[in-house]
């Protein structure tokens, strides 16, 4: 989003943090926003991500669902009397092109069922995924593609 | 009603933290442990923070809780990524149950490329 919108967003969050909505506090928020932007401008990655609100919510919904499934799965694995895991590392070819897309995908992979991203290849094309279910590598890749990658591509690419 | 919901969230959150700790002990190697340590702790922490914001029920606390959850979900996977990558490059091997390791092959390939590049440099 543009820097002005960002500044107003930060000021609004400041109002909520403070709990009292007076013009004075909003002004303080704006000053803080200006300071934050002043120091972090260089690493701010300009994109259109937050404008496609619809796809963004679709991603959030899909991600939340996967998050619940992941935790039930961890629960089952950890609390079952006999450890039945088949770990292994598989490569995953991504279609995400932008740094933001790849970062979001790698992060989401770590938080969703049975998968953990270990490294991204130098050309940003392959994510190495540690999985607890190596017997079905195609299913793992398929669930990443449908549950995470497609919503991310829709939201930020 | 909201007290009940808060209690469920707090207990559920703590329970998932417990699961994460048990997983940390039971699972065989660094990478499997990171699975438990990232997924279950972020989930549990989210539950605890939401439960806390329900109890206090004020804009200030809720904002703080939501921001904390947001940054937790943003940073926990990054930490897990770095820890497991560093572990792979420097330290403990994959556990015996591991059958596939494509990442190892990739690193090997990179190394031999570097070597041949050096040889060309010498010539």
Image (cartoon, grey):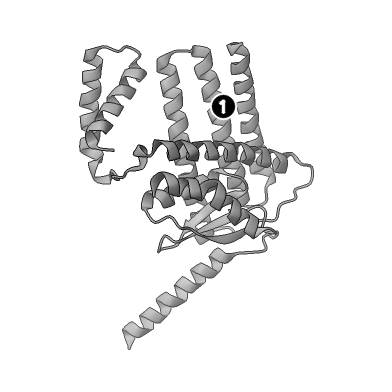
User: Which secondary structure lies at badge 1?
Assistant: helix
Residue A129 in sight from this viewpoint: yes
Q: Is residue A12 toward the left or the right of residue A105 in the image?
A: left
* B68 or A48: nearer the viewer: A48
Q: Considering only vertical position in the picture, is B55 above or below B102?
A: above
Which residue: 49% across, 13% down?
Answer: B56
What residue is shown with label 1?
B47
In the rendered structure, the residue with mark 1 lies on which chain? B
Q: In x, y percent, where is residue A108?
A: 50, 45
* Total residue callouts: 1
Residue B90 appearing in the image: no
The image quadrant of residue B114 is bottom left
**Rendering coords of residue A156 (x, y %):** 39, 46
In this view, which residue lies farthest toward the right?
Answer: A81
Most foreground residue, A25 or B89: A25
Q: Nearer the viewer, residue B36 or A3?
A: A3
Residue B77 image offset from top left, x and y in percent? 49, 44
Vertical relation: B91 (above or below) A60? below
Answer few, some or many: residues within 10 Å of disc 1's Cα (few below 14, many 20 plus, some between 14 and 19). Answer: many
Q: Quadrant of the N terminus of chain A?
A: top left
Residue at image position (26%, 11%) is A22
As drawn, the residue found furthest toward the front would be: A54
Q: Which residue in the rendered view is the most extreme toward the bottom? A: B123
Residue A79 drawn above or below residue A13:
below
The residue located at (55%, 43%) in the rendering is: A111
In percent of width and height, residue A31 lies at 20, 25
**Residue B119 quadrant:** bottom left
């Amino acid at each position: 989003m543009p820097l002005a919108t960002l500044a107003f967003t930060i000021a609004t969050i400041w109002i909520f943090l403070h709990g009292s909505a007076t013009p004075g506090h909003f002004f303080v928020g704006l000053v803080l926003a200006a300071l934050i932007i002043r120091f972090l401008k260089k690493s701010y990655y300009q994109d259109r991500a937050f404008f496609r609100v619809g796809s963004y919510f679709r991603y959030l919904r899909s991600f939340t669902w996967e998050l619940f499934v992941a935790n039930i799965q961890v629960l089952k694995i950890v609390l079952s009397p006999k450890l039945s895991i088949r770990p292994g590392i598989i490569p995953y070819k991504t279609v995400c092109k932008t740094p933001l897309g790849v970062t979001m995908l790698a992060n989401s992979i770590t938080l969703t069922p049975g998968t953990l991203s270990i490294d991204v290849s130098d050309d940003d094309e392959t994510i190495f995924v540690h999985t607890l279910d190596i017997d079905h590598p195609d299913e793992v890749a398929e669930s990443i593609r449908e549950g995470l990658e497609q919503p991310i591509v829709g939201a930020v690419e | 009603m909201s007290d009940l919901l808060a209690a469920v969230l707090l207990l559920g959150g703590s329970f998932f933290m417990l699961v994460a700790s048990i997983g940390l002990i039971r699972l065989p190697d660094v990478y499997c442990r990171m699975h438990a340590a990232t997924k279950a702790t972020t989930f549990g922490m989210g539950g605890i923070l939401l439960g806390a914001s329900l109890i206090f029920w004020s804009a200030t606390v809720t904002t703080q809780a939501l921001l904390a959850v947001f940054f937790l979900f943003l940073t926990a996977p990054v930490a897990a990524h770095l820890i497991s990558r560093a572990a792979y490059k420097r330290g403990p091997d994959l556990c015996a149950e591991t059958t596939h390791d494509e990442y190892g092959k990739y690193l090997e390939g990179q190394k031999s490329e570097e070597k041949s590049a050096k040889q060309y440099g010498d010539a």
